[in-house]
Image (spheres, grey):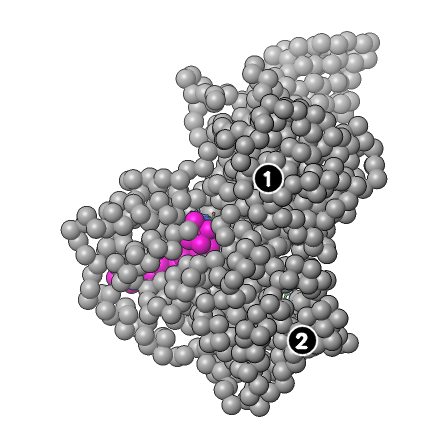
Amino acid sequence: MRHIISLLMENEAGALSRVAGLFSARAYNIESLTVAPTEDATLSRMTIVTTGSEDVIEQITKQLNKLVDVIKVMDLTDGLHIERELMLVKVKAVGAGREEMKRTADIFRGRIIDVTDATYTIELTGTGSKLDAFLEAIDPAFIIETVRTGASGIGRGERSLKV
Amino acid sequence: MIYCQFMEATGAEIVVRCLAEEGVEFVFGYPGGAVLNIYDEIFKQNKFKHVLVRHEQAAVHAADAYARATGRVGVALVTSGPGVTNAVTGIATAYMDSIPIVVVTGQVPTPAIGLDAFQEVDTVGITRPCVKHNFLVKDVKDLAVTMKKAFIIAATGRPGPVVVDVPKDVTAHLTEFDYPATVEMRSYNPVVKGHSGQLKRAVQMLLEAKRPMIYAGGGVVLGDASPQLAELTRLLGFPVTNTLMGLGGYPATDKQNLGMLGMHGTYEANMAMQHCDVLLAVGARFDDRVIGNPAHFAREQRRIIHVDIDPSSISKRVKVDVPIVGDVQNVLTDMLALLKQAKEKPDAAALNAWWTQIELWRSRNCLKYNQNSPIIKPQYVVEKLWEVTKGDAFITSDVGQHQMWAAQYYKFDKPRRWINSGGLGTMGVGLPYAMGVQLAHPDAQVACITGESSIQMCIQELSTCKQYRIPIKVVTLNNRYMGMVRQWQEFFYGSRYAESYMESLPDFVKLAEAYGHVGMRIDKPGDVEAALKEAFSPALKERLVFMDFQTDQTENVFPMVEGGKGLSEMILAEEL
Ligand SMILES: Cc1cc2nc3c(=O)[nH]c(=O)nc-3n(C[C@H](O)[C@H](O)[C@H](O)COP(=O)(O)OP(=O)(O)OC[C@H]3O[C@@H](n4cnc5c(N)ncnc54)[C@H](O)[C@@H]3O)c2cc1C
Ligand SMILES: Cc1ncc(C[n+]2csc(CCOP(=O)(O)OP(=O)(O)O)c2C)c(N)n1
Ligand SMILES: [Mg+2]
């Protein structure tokens, strides 16, 4: 099963490598990992997308909690949550395909943020699967480059991860 | 001790003062460029003693053994680069067995970090997977607080090694020294009290048991909970087994103790473990050497209560029914209180029948061996050692067959007496472990049970023992083989003994003498007892005695659970 794990940790040098090292040392999967400081600059917020059986996910959350720098861990997938990822796609936009590309981007609520005679650069946000769906909706031959941030997540409603 | 607070001090002075404030008795170390400022401060002080080893690996092992034998944090000090890489084996060894140590490492000056400077290694990176935590101190202002954190983290919760990496320029920089009494860490708060609801469920389950079993591990020793374990076990009348790391956590000579369990555990302990209906696991981590094939273990129905301070130890390899996160001493104390209040008593009839079954298993006498051999049997040496030392010595061991015989035949009645590397299984620990133990307990009898292969991995420490007059007794069970490897090759590789023999062995008697010690070679069973008595006699009390026992080359360790087999599928000596 796919799980989105959110955590808060001390914003110290090497914090990211402790988490990354844990995943490689224990052979856990990482689909994506994003990290940045929060409004409190002493804290880093990390979102990790991983897959594994329930037992493995249980071990992952326990092992993350065990890291001395980690303050809180939450498995977002345990409850209602919002997941967002940002993608930038550079595509060929020539001839009839140019209009078609704009229409498809509109359908997915994408924004064209850079234009040349021959290309569009499209910005899209959404869940990972929405971004996948966009890439499937366009002709792969048109794709020049894609950049994805990996997922960020947050609990719905009152559900929050705070110190 | 009173230091003038708020006076400026260098980083080096601060390191030394922090160690003094922590009440450190010994620092095991080896100097080098990056730590010269620290050594200069050590030279000027007399609060603690520095023990100069002959290899950094031994410094960490000795600090680790000091911690195991006393329950206090052990301290080692090494220089940057090769000093650190040499120390890594020691750090990983302590990590696997959850031993509290602080290792201070020198680092190149901060401006040189990352420039492939002379003797630079990424210490924090190299040690990250084998420490509980590590720090690189870039600002002298953080040094005292970091040292305090290091001691707190090492000793609390599930203990473990902490590395503090100090760049050379930081040891020269000045700041005000103020050693905090404690430090709050919002990210680090180990749970120590057991959950009361879980405790009640556990007690209920114990009282309902028909075929109960207590499985006690290293956590009982680390958490100093032997008295509580003994009280609980006796109150309930249940059988108990110890892991290799838990030996001495419950007296070995007590009737209720079934001995060690696991790969080389006793028949009765393994059978009881497999066939119990309620299992109380305390401070033990269901290691693969302990439960054998987990699928086979899961075939029998049993309910499991697991007490451990580290949530990640629980349901890692074996699913449990009642997890209790907390300090073993606290949890057992709470359990005892609940048991004493309870109206129900353990089911006496069921317990009787269970003990009858256990005694039947015990009557297989799985540790018997040939007492009439004309060649020295290694088991016999350990048994005699137990007799000669009246079962009251501190025993360290190396890794191999001799380690298993030490565990099986030296009956440990007290905790912190058995000092060995279980998790990493590091050959070479025996001699430096004995140094750390003897320094911690100068008047105690300390013996190192070792093999002719293991002892050569840290043999240089005989020189340290001479310098500090450390009078340990080395008991070498010399089978001219890497016996444990040879045993596996005999069983699983058609007796093809690839590279597992020890040729060109030194003359250990002469070697011991060359280092300034007493050497003895013992060839006949009839001479074993006399040699041991002489070694432990008042005449040699102050001397290190190296005993080279020429033991049976073909002897194997039994019982044995082969890799992948179930716990109850043991090979016994008589079956071969
Ligand atoms: C050659 C060889 C053969 C071996 N054969 C065997 C064998 O036959 N049988 C055997 O048992 N082992 C054997 N071992 C050792 C084995 O590899 C493991 O090291 C050992 O079994 C682990 O012991 P343990 O489960 O007690 O855990 P430890 O490694 O001692 O871990 C302690 C546990 O207690 C917890 N803990 C620590 N402090 C506290 C506290 N205050 N409160 C609560 N919990 C706490 C920790 O979180 C941890 O889970 C062998 C090793 C070697 C090298
Ligand atoms: C540093 C290290 N290298 C290799 C091993 C693998 N190993 C385990 S036991 C053993 C042989 C030990 O031989 P010896 O010290 O003579 O003890 P014996 O088994 O003969 O009693 C070896 C090589 C190890 N545990 N540690
Ligand atoms: Mg040998």
Q: CA distance from mark 2 to mark 1?
A: 37 Å
Q: Choose between B439 and B374: the one closer to the eye.
A: B439
Query: From what the image shows, is residue B372 above or below residue B470?
Result: below
From the viewer's perspective, is A102 left or right of B277?
right
Q: Which residues are magenta?
A: B210-223
Q: Choose between A149 and B372: the one closer to the eye.
A: B372
| B277 drawn magenta | no
Element at badge 1?
helix
Residue B19 is labelled as 1
Label 2 packing within 10 angstroms: few (<14), some (14-19), many (20+): many
First along the sequence among labels 2 and 1: 1
From the viewer's perspective, is B80 left or right of B280?
right
User: Which residue is found at the position 33% from the left and 53% from the top?
Assistant: B228
Do we see residue A87 in this rendering? yes
> In the picture, residue A15 is in which quadrant?
top right
Query: From what the image shows, is residue A94 above or below residue B37?
Result: above
Query: From what the image shows, is residue B467 above or below residue A131?
Result: below
User: Which residue is found at the position 33% from the left and 77% from the top?
Assistant: B360
Amino acid on which the number 1 mark rests in the picture: Leu
Label 1 packing within 10 angstroms: few (<14), some (14-19), many (20+): many
